[in-house]
């Protein structure tokens, strides 16, 4: 049997091949390979040697792995794993970035193997001091644990690190000093109150989302070429949505009211985003120029910066959409609400009018075992809902 130099293979009294290899702790362990000289024993030998070499390389490279180094390695996994089918990152990548920021600041130069429950509680205390709400803190702590669980799966750290971190329970309702989120009920008057304080694009986004119940990310990424306009009720099938990475489809019915709003934002290019910050800025500048009372000086004909620090994107992001609504609420003098509450209000109304199945279809909450027949029934029910609601 061919073998690596320095790693002998022995034959025991039962004529079985045996090889001795060190484990992660340096203890030597016997591995039985099978009948000495058989093809099976040679295959087993090759497998054990490959695993041992990989383990040895990791021990040599990552034995003194710091938290900063672990974050760098984990971030490669985040960029690879948390992305849409078209390769663009999902919102979960940003969530991990915010979750790991205090970890890096407090324990970046500490050994990853020494990160324990007290360190995790210290990081959580930083979040408490930043006045994050309890539910957000609990989700961020879970994401931190996910990084160490991934490190254990990659054999970068010992499994005891992750098991120790699991001992830190989440903050309980009414049993911590963490701030609780205000459950602001969204009424029709709350939506109408902020519309005068929004620009034309954000105002239309709010109205369309209220009429269709789509997610904030879906209204932000809407393109004309994703909308089937062949019927009286349009069918919007976004290529990017919350469950696209699971291979699930998403169909959103767009009724006559929402159609009239959307028609004012279509461009000749079918692949343009329906709602674009760049076009919003161009319209805003054009309106200012049209309303100018004094003559334009020669030095003010073109005042574009050569290298501006901020350039509007070709589509709205969830954060910018949320921030625009927040500013509108503050100007209107009402309690701040968020785009997701438009979706929740839509679901509440649909369930009252069409029952639980109608709410499930309208919100796109499909089960894992949905069949082709059931998907067709979903589209028919979605069309009925959209024709009567939006």
Image: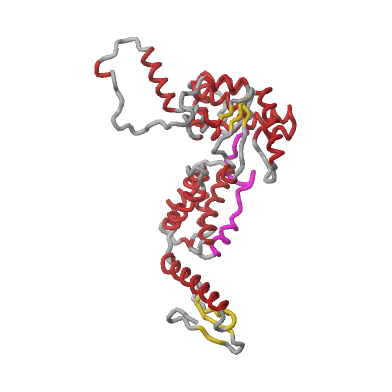
Is residue 29 something that shows in the picture? yes
- Please identify the quarter of the rendering in which residue 341 is found: top right
- Please identify the quarter of the rendering in which residue 244 is found: top right
Reply above or below: 35 against 245.
below
Instruction: State yes or no: residue 105 in magenta.
Output: no
Quadrant where the C terminus is found in the figure: top right
Residue 238 on image: x %, y %: 56, 35
Residue 73 on image: x %, y %: 44, 56
Residue in the image at 70% along x and 26% along y: 384
Residue in the image at 29% along x and 13% along y: 296
The colour scheme of the drawn protein is secondary structure
- Please identify the quarter of the rendering in which residue 207 is found: top right
Q: Nearer the viewer, residue 235 or 188?
A: 235
Instruction: State yes or no: residue 182 in magenta.
Output: yes
Q: Which residues are magenta?
A: 159-184
Reply above or below: 112 against 242.
below
**Magenta stretch secondary structure, dominant:** loop
Residue in the image at 57% along x and 79% along y: 33
Residue 69 on image: x %, y %: 42, 57
């Amino acid at each position: 049997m061919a073998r690596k130099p320095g790693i002998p293979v022995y034959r025991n009294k039962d004529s079985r091949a045996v090889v001795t290899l060190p484990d992660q702790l340096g203890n030597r362990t016997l591995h039985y390979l099978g009948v000495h000289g058989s093809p099976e024993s040679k295959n087993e030998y090759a497998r054990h040697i490959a695993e041992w070499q990989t383990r040895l390389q990791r021990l040599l490279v990552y034995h003194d792995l710091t938290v900063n180094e672990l974050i760098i390695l984990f971030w490669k996994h985040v960029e690879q794993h948390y992305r849409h089918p078209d390769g663009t990152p999902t919102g979960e990548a940003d969530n991990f970035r915010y979750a790991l920021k205090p970890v890096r600041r407090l324990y970046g130069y500490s050994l990853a193997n020494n990160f324990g429950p007290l360190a995790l509680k210290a990081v959580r205390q930083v979040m408490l001091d930043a006045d994050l709400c309890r539910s957000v803190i609990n989700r961020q702590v879970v994401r931190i644990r996910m990084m160490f669980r991934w490190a254990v799966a990659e054999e970068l750290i010992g499994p005891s690190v992750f098991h120790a971190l699991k001992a830190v329970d989440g903050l309980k309702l009414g049993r911590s000093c963490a701030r609780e989120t205000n459950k602001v009920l969204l009424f029709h008057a709350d939506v109408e109150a902020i519309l005068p304080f929004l620009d034309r694009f954000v105002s239309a986004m709010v109205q369309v989302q209220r009429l269709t119940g789509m997610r904030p990310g879906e209204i932000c990424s809407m393109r004309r070429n994703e909308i089937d306009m062949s019927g009286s009720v349009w069918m919007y099938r976004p290529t990017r949505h919350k469950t696209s990475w699971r291979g699930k489809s998403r169909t959103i019915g767009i009724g006559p009211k929402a159609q009239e709003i959307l028609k004012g934002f279509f461009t000749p290019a079918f692949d343009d985003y329906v709602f674009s910050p760049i076009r919003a800025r161009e319209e805003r500048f054009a309106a200012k120029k049209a309303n100018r009372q004094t003559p334009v000086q020669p030095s003010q004909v073109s005042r574009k910066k050569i290298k501006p620090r901020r350039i509007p994107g070709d589509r709205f992001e969830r954060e910018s959409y949320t921030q625009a609504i927040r500013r509108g609420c503050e100007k209107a003098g009402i309690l701040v609400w968020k785009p997701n509450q438009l979706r929740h209000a839509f679901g509440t109304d649909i369930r009252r009018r069409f029952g639980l199945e109608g709410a499930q279809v309208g919100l796109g909450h499909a089960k894992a075992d949905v069949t082709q027949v059931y998907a067709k029934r979903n589209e028919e029910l979605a069309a009925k809902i959209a024709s009567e609601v939006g």
